[in-house]
Structure formats: structure tokens, C-alpha cells
Image: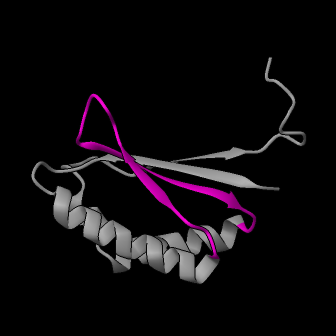
Amino acid sequence: MRIDYYIYYRLKPDQHEAFVDALSAMQAAMHARTGIQGRFRRRLDDPLTWMEVYEGVRDRRQFEIELGLLVEHHGLTRFIEGDAIRHMERFRALPDESTPCA
């Protein structure tokens, strides 16, 4: 089963540049360890809200272990605003991706 991850959170103000460096390094390490190439986005109407996207994960347990270790290693939580948290959502692909949703 293929799983896609969407992780979103709010950054502290004035953290953009250092955060992008840390997140890019973390995603490069994730790609090297798991083969999963992450992407990141910033919300259009709220530049402090960011999202990480990881698609096509097949080994959920291993991916989440590696993600946790790398987030910690690269210190990503130090950039998150106040008591905000990293919200993780998981979506699975439909058996037949061409089937329209009802």
C-alpha cells in the first residue's frame, strides 16, 4: 500500500531562511535513507504556515522512525511557533487511482 504524508505547522516569524536550510538538509538525508523525495510548500495566504509532502511511502513504520530521527537531528522543531505542533496526516492511494471519488 502506498501512503502519502502531509505535515503542516506554523513557523516563528523571521525564521524563513534558516528553516529552509535545515529542512532542505533534512529532506536530502531522508531521500538518502529511504528513497523518498520530500517537497515543501508555504501557504499562500499565511506565509508562516508550511507543509512538507512525502509521497509513495511503502514502509510506514520505517519512514516514520527515520522522519522522527531526522527532524530531531536537524532541529526543525526549534523553528515552530510557540506551542504549535507538527500535524501529520496520512492518505493512502485508491486501489485504482483512475476511480473518481464520490
Q: Residue furthest top?
A: 102
Q: Position of residue 48 (x, y in %)?
A: 23, 42
Q: Residue 47 in magenta?
A: yes
Left or right: where 79 falls relative to 70: left
Q: Residue 8 in magenta?
A: no
- The quadrant of the rendering that contains the N terminus is bottom right
Q: What residue is rendered at 63% in x and 75% in y?
A: 35
Q: Position of residue 85 (x, y in %)?
A: 34, 50
Left or right: where 29 falls relative to 64: left
Q: Is residue 90 above or below residue 1?
A: above
Q: Residue furthest front?
A: 98
Q: Nearer the viewer, residue 92 or 61?
A: 92
Left or right: where 11 falls relative to 60: left
* Count of numbered circles on the image: 0
Q: Position of residue 6 (x, y in %)?
A: 53, 48
Q: Position of residue 91 (x, y in %)?
A: 67, 44
Left or right: where 74 falls relative to 6: left
Q: In this figure, which colouring scheme has been used for the structure?
A: one colour
Q: Is residue 18 above or below residue 73?
A: above
- The quadrant of the rendering that contains the C terminus is top right
Q: Which residues are magenta?
A: 35-59
Q: What residue is rendered at 45% in x and 70% in y?
A: 27
Q: What residue is rendered at 58% in x and 82% in y?
A: 33
Q: What residue is rendered at 18% in x and 62% in y?
A: 17
Q: Is residue 96 above or below residue 58?
A: above
